[in-house]
Image (spheres, rainbow, N blue to C red):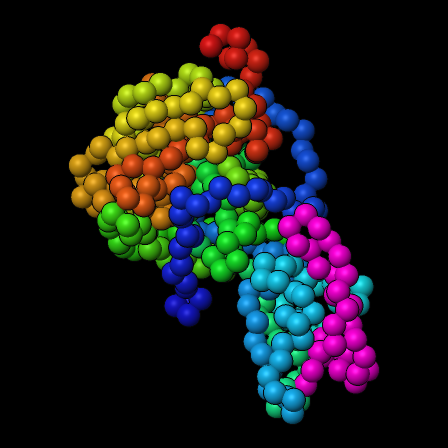
Amino acid sequence: MNHSRIILHLILLVSFVLPFTVSDHVAADAINEVEEIIPGGHSIGVKLHTSGVVVVGFSPIQTDDGKISPAEETGIEIGDIILQVNQQKIEDMQTFTHLIQKYKDDDTPIELLVKRQEHIFPVTITPVSDEDDEYRLGLFIRDATAGIGTMTFYDPKSKRYGALGHVITDHQTKRPIDIYNGKIVPSNITSINKGESGSPGEKRARFSMEDKSLGTIQKNSDYGIFGKLEDEGPFLEDHVDPLPVAQAHEVKEGEAKILTVVEDNKIEEFEVEIVSSVPSKHPETKGMVVQITDPDLLDATGGIVQGMSGSPIIQDDKIVGAVTHVFLNDPTSGYGVHIEWMLNEAGLEIKDEQKEAS
């Protein structure tokens, strides 16, 4: 249905160096060893639901005493996550609104359980009635966000995947989204705004969150989003063979290629150059600098654009990393993350024998 289609994009800026958050309800899986993984390049639609509701702004309420925002006056801040109302868990905006109205006739303060970064604490607040006699706190909230990105890899044995290569932040609060759950679906690229110096370009895509889910989202971290696939169809249709994975110290300066989509859902291969690679023994979000050299990709996109994040980087027939960030002053270049660190976040690691041989 046309009305269910949405065209959105994930904001990709070089300022995305932020601490990761993982939803508390996701249990840690056992570490799986891998020798090979299937490269991605698929364009995916992404939808994340937060735990609780996120405060994204304030809305002063007109009362007999003037305009007031009880939430702001009580000390609530933009970016705070409201988890409970009077010890009752909040699952979405509808639940939150219903609970606030439920206590209208009591005319007494209510208690919110608030999460601010790593701290969780109670806040006592007294809502007020607006001109329509609605009980309100004077704030704007959100419980979900959507956009597009690129799949990086998939492990057919464990069905775990990794995508994006960077954390998803709320575009208003600029903070990582503390997820409750989420899913990914197929998407088709409809057009591209080319990147220019000082203005990053973007892929525009069409997808519906009512479409069959490709997989769940269980983690949103500095190194991307991670979860398990429920539908292997796109991977089976593309008949992509698995490739070995490279450790960070194996990556070298020189020619490489990326897999990404610039039209519809067709994955294409484009030439790039790895300008530098830091052989860190510890996780690093910006371990590589990558430059687009393929004339066809430069003509189509101007370089690295929003929505390209997660595009797998392949060198010497090994998956070495993923594109993550664009340089605002030079859209032909940007950062990449080593695949080793993305695998770790997905609960995968390079098999010992491969480590010893490298």
User: Which residue: 46% across, 38% down?
Assistant: 165
**Figure check: 219 above or below 340:** below
The mark tally for this picture is 0
User: Which residue: 40% across, 33% down?
Assistant: 336
Residue lying at the far top in this picture: please name it.
Answer: 357
Task: Using the rendered image of the protein, determine whether residue 255 is visible from the camera's viewpoint.
Answer: yes
Q: Nearer the viewer, residue 335 or 179?
A: 335
**Image coordinates for residue 264, horizontal then vertical, percent:** 30, 50
Task: Using the rendered image of the protein, determine whether residue 54 is visible from the camera's viewpoint.
Answer: no
Q: Nearer the viewer, residue 256 or 73?
A: 73
**Image coordinates for residue 115, horizontal then vertical, percent:** 69, 55
User: Which residue: 65% across, 47% down?
Assistant: 23
Assess whether residue 117 is covered by the magenta stretch: yes
**Figure check: 35 above or below 185:** above
**Figure check: 208 above or below 160:** below
**Image coordinates for residue 208, horizontal then vertical, percent:** 44, 59
User: Which residue: 55% across, 10% down?
Assistant: 353
Q: Does residue 273 appear left or right of residue 225 in this picture?
A: left
Tell me which segment is drawn in magenta. Answer: 100-129
